[in-house]
Structure formats: structure tokens, C-alpha cells
Image (spheres, helix red, strand yellow):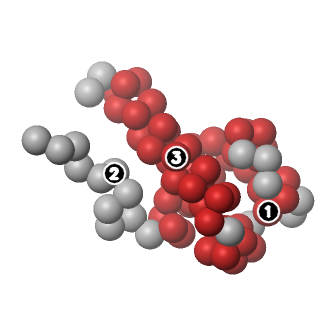
Amino acid sequence: MAKPDPLHGVTLKALLTDLVDYYGWEELSQRINIKCFTNDPSISSSLKFLRKTPWARTKVEALYVESLDSKHTSAGY
């Protein structure tokens, strides 16, 4: 049976908010070096950038999936 898509039903805003809550802006900008995370970061400015920049969105989505795996591993799932 195929593994369910962890991004299914998750909005970009929810995904980004979860990443900021989990890592904070500073660590997030170290993991993905894009200007919207390093210079005066905010959810709204980051969403604008990520919606029009597919390569950056792909990196953010991959980090989100990785963070889900880390959360499940540390929670003992």
C-alpha cells in the first residue's frame, strides 16, 4: 500500500507556520537560505515569495516532511 502524501490537505500557510513554530526564523534561515527567511522575515512576505518561486517552495515542503519524520521519531511513533 502506498504511503499517504504528508502534504495532502496542508496549506502553504499552515506548513510555514508549523516550520516557524518548530525551528524559529533563525534556524529556518540556516536550513534554507532564502532572503524572505533572513531579512525581516514574516509569514506574509514568505508566502508571497514561496507562491511565486517553485524551487524555494519545494525546499520548504521537503523540510516540512523531514520535520514531520523527526517529530514522529522523537515522539516514539
Mark 2 and mark 3: Cα distance apart in space: 10 Å
Q: Earlier in the sequence, mark 3 or mark 1?
A: 1
Q: Residue furthest left?
A: 1
What residue sits right under mark 1 in the picture?
A: 36
Q: Is residue 34 left or right of residue 61?
A: right
Q: Position of residue 46 (x, y in %)?
A: 71, 68
Taking depth in this image into account, of 49 and 18 the one nearest to the observer is 49
- Categorize mark 2 by other alpha carbons within 10 Å: few (<14), some (14-19), many (20+): few
Q: Position of residue 73 (x, y in %)?
A: 37, 25
- Tell me if I can see residue 47 in this picture: no
The part of the image, by quadrant, that contains residue 2 is top left
Residue under the point 40% across and 34% down: 69
Residue under the point 61% across and 50% down: 59
What residue sits right under mark 3 in the picture?
A: 62
| Three-letter code, disc 3 | Ala
The disc at residue 6 is 2
Q: Earlier in the sequence, mark 2 or mark 3?
A: 2
Q: Position of residue 74 (x, y in %)?
A: 40, 24
- The quarter of the image holding the C terminus is top left
